[in-house]
Amino acid sequence: MIKYIFLLFFSIFLLSGCGDKLSTSTTDDSANITKALLTGTWTAKCSDNTTASTSSKTVLVFSASGDNLAATTTNYSGLSCVTQSSVFTKKLNTLVLGSKTKTLQNQIINKFTAAVTDITLEPKTSSVSTSLNSFCGLTGWSLATEKSIAGLTCGSITYNAVNDSYFDIIQMNSEKTFIRLGNITNAASNGYPKSLYTQEYYK
């Protein structure tokens, strides 16, 4: 069970990337972000955790209007993103883009806000569904059936409840080929991340 709980937390950490070191030498080339540019599917590369012999991949889907975002992290029981173990999804709506600004590290970004519509977890194997029994205070986990964990405390993490405000930052490179999101584990008093993750999402 400990392994699968670790998998869950690992996926949540990777929802926006893995680390916050980012060169500032290319920040002036960041694009002016619009909802039209964000529309569509952005996919990160498979990320291996060699210590735990697991992996994960995150996909961001912005709706045609640019108002909704579904961020889905699929966890895998081995390396190279082959055998699925669970799927963690964060669903947001009423996304509002702020004006272009900078982080304290001179990373050019846009702030954005949204509202949480749901946060779910779905076991992909029977062993994972069994290991999740009573996790987040929930019972009756079933294979390939997602459960909402919005507003619940799972281990040491308490998730946003439905309709809670969500704060993040986003950067797009000048060629408009990839985006980065904020380090949500390092937020300022106003709720926005102070820096960007290095994880890149490509169309």
Image (tube, grey):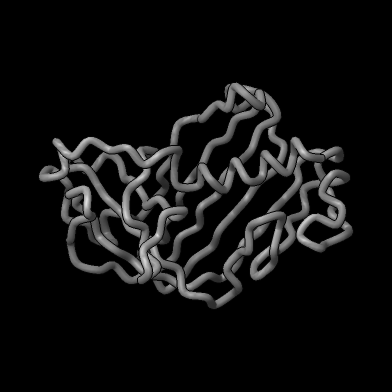
**Is any part of residue 203 visible from this angle?**
no
Residue 122 placement, left or right of 57: right
Residue nearest the viewer, comparing 4 with 91 = 4
Residue drawn at (87%, 60%), measured in percent from left and top? 139
Residue drawn at (71%, 58%), measured in percent from left and top? 154
- Image location (x, y in percent) of residue 187: 40, 60
Which quadrant is home to the C terminus?
A: top left
Question: In which quarter of the view is residue 148 placed?
Answer: bottom right
Q: Residue furthest left?
A: 28
Which quadrant is home to the N terminus?
A: top right
Residue drawn at (69%, 67%), measured in percent from left and top? 152
- Image location (x, y in percent) of residue 39: 35, 56
Residue 109 placement, left or right of 123: left
Image position of 123 with respect to 139: above or below: above
- Image location (x, y in percent) of residue 43: 44, 40
- Image location (x, y in percent) of residue 25: 14, 36
**Is any part of residue 97 visible from this angle?**
yes
Residue drawn at (72%, 50%), measured in percent from left and top? 122
